Amino acid sequence: MFLTRALEKILADKEVKKSHHSQLRKACEVALEEIKEESEKLSPPPDSKSDSSTLPPIKSKTSFVEADKYFLPFELACQSKCPRIVITSLDCLQKLIAYGHLTGSAPDSTAPGKKLIDRIIETICGCFQGPQTDEGVQLQIIKVGICGYLVCKEVCFGYCVFCC
């Protein structure tokens, strides 16, 4: 699963091993454990008819992962100020939004009265630090911004334009 690989990639970065990234490291580990537990609950028993590992599994509601609850590690990764980690996080956010796994429609647990999409957009826009922002980070900000607009324009268009 892409979500797992992205979290593992963030965890494997040498910057994350430093003590000032302990909160990010812990958030990634917790999210990975929760994803593992959730996938074990949802995974069907092995079937001898579906041995092909080249084809993606058939989409169904039981195998669909709602990524909204796993946003915290990506938020912390975006705040890390390390371009490699920020680029990985933004790339994953873009793909999660594009494939409908990250909708942001849930209420934001950190700010009553707001939706998670507001925090997602603030996090993405917060990666831009002015002209000195890494070019790779700038490219990812543009990609995830465009994707967010195309996928959920009715939800976030006004707020997104305001932030940009």
Image: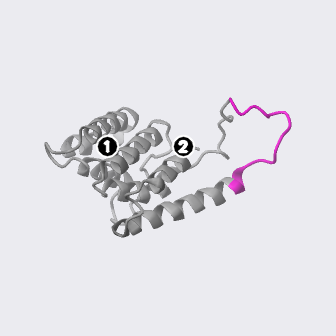
- Residue plotted at (68% across, 36% down): 57
Residues 112 and 85: in front is: 85
Q: In the picture, which quadrant includes the N terminus?
A: top right
- Residue plotted at (15% across, 45% down): 132
Query: Picture coordinates of residue 52 (x, y %)?
Result: 75, 31
Q: Residue 40's image quarter?
A: bottom right
Query: Picture coordinates of residue 70 (x, y %)?
Result: 48, 56
Q: Amino acid at mark 2?
A: Phe
Q: Callout 1: few (<14), some (14-19), or many (20+) C-alpha neighbours within 10 Å?
A: some
Is residue 83 located in the magenta-colored stretch of the structure?
Answer: no
Q: Which mark is residue 2?
A: 2
Q: Amino acid at mark 1?
A: Cys
Query: Picture coordinates of residue 99 (x, y %)?
Result: 50, 37
The boundaries of the magenta stretch are 40-54
Kindly state the secondary structure of the residue where label 1 is placed: helix
Q: Which residue is mark 1?
A: 156
Along the horizontal axis of the image, is 106 left or right of 160? right
Question: Is residue 124 shown above or below 98?
Answer: below
Q: In the picture, which quadrant includes the C terminus?
A: top left
Residues 66 and 5: in front is: 5
